[in-house]
């Protein structure tokens, strides 16, 4: 079943990462550019994960997860090598307002991580709906190579023109012309 790409504002949302391995690291790196309120709880930490936590002053606790850790959390990423815990967290959050991502189990996910390309406010998300993550990574690299190098700069320029003009047909025409030029 294909998944719908919903783009969501996570700025200041309370995001709990459970686990401190390389997969947790990758999730943290992906989340940081979107400014969430991160916290990490893990029994132990991979040195690289510890490094990014320290460098970004992310609050962390070195201990096992407990279900009370879900109090006041908006999003939880279960990046542990324990499918039972992924399932339990998913089940225990069904009557809570918490979105879950489980790194091993699309069945225990409310959302899955995309590969993405970000150029300022332009974000291109890629998914295989959980089926072939390695392909999402490959497609991301392919897209990165094909995008115009000055995309963000041009985007900012056209955005400013759009903001200044009054809404309506004339603006639509002008903006679409400028966008077409980008790919000439
Ligand atoms: C379902 C999902 C859940 C989720 O994490 O949200 C999930 C699950 C699993 N990944 C596994 C393996 C790999 N994952 C990657 C890479 C990425 N995985 C990411 C997302 C997702 N991975 C979600 C689906 C995304 C989609 O729909 O496409 C990306 C896009 C985002 C990110 O993680 O940041 C990131 C690329 C980012 C980038 O490069 O831009 C690579 C390649 C590599 O490492 O280079 C491999 C090895 C090759 C392979 O197996 O494909 C395994 C098996 C583990 C094992 O075998 O033990 C599982 C579990 C399972 O499949 O059961
Ligand atoms: N979604 C994805 O992109 C991918 C997912 N995976 C899967 O992700 C899982 C994690 O992979 P790695 O980070 O390499 O594993 P890892 O074993 O290095 O890390 C697991 C971390 O979870 C912590 N942990 C385990 N139980 C805990 C608990 N009850 N409370 C708190 N912390 C706990 C451990 O201390 C460790 O830091 C694996 O099961 C792997 O199959 C692997 C590759 C890609």
Image: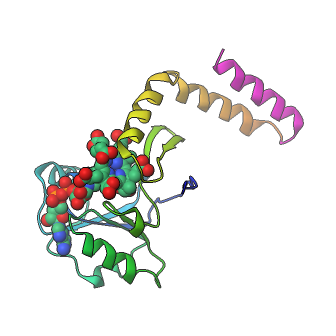
The image quadrant that residue 82 belongs to is bottom left
Residue drawn at 88 percent across, 36 percent down: 169
Q: Is residue 63 visible?
A: yes
Left/right placement of residue 85 relative to residue 127 reads left
Residue 81, placed above or below residue 148: below
- Viewport quadrant of the C terminus: top right
Residue nearest the observer in this picture, 165 or 175: 175
Q: Is residue 138 magenta?
A: no
- Image coordinates of residue 115 in percent, x first then y, are 42, 44
The image quadrant that residue 68 belongs to is bottom left
Q: What number of labels is visible?
A: 0
Residue 164, placed above or below residue 149: below
- Image coordinates of residue 89 in percent, x first then y, are 33, 77
Could you tell me what secondary structure mostly forms the magenta stretch? helix
Residue drawn at 44 percent across, 66 percent down: 13
Seen as rendered, the residue at the extreme top is: 184
Residue 55, placed above or below residue 79: above
Q: Is residue 175 magenta?
A: yes
- Image coordinates of residue 154 in percent, x first then y, are 60, 25
Left/right placement of residue 125 relative to residue 54 reads right
The magenta-colored residue range is 167-184
Residue drawn at 12 percent across, 54 percent down: 46
The structure's colour scheme is rainbow
Left/right placement of residue 71 relative to residue 173 reads left
Residue 77, placed above or below residue 162: below
Residue nearest the observer in this picture, 1 or 91: 1
């Amino acid at each position: 079943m294909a998944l719908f790409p919903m783009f969501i504002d996570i700025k200041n949302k309370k995001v709990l990462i459970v686990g401190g391995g390389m997969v947790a690291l990758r999730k943290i790196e992906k989340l940081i550019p979107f400014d969430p309120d991160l916290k990490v709880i893990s029994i132990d930490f991979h040195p690289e994960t510890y490094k990014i936590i320290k460098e970004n002053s992310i609050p962390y606790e070195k201990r096992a997860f407990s279900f009370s850790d879900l109090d006041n959390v908006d999003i939880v990423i279960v990046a542990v090598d324990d499918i039972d815990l992924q399932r339990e967290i998913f089940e225990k959050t069904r009557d809570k307002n918490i979105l879950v991502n489980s790194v091993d189990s699309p069945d225990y996910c409310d959302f899955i991580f995309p590969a993405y390309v970000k150029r300022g406010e332009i974000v291109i998300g890629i998914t295989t709906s959980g089926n072939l993550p390695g392909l999402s990574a490959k497609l991301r690299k392919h897209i990165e190579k094909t995008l115009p190098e000055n995309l963000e700069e041009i985007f900012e320029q056209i955005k400013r023109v759009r903001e200044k003009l009054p809404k309506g047909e004339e603006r639509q025409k002008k903006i679409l012309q400028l966008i077409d030029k980008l790919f000439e």
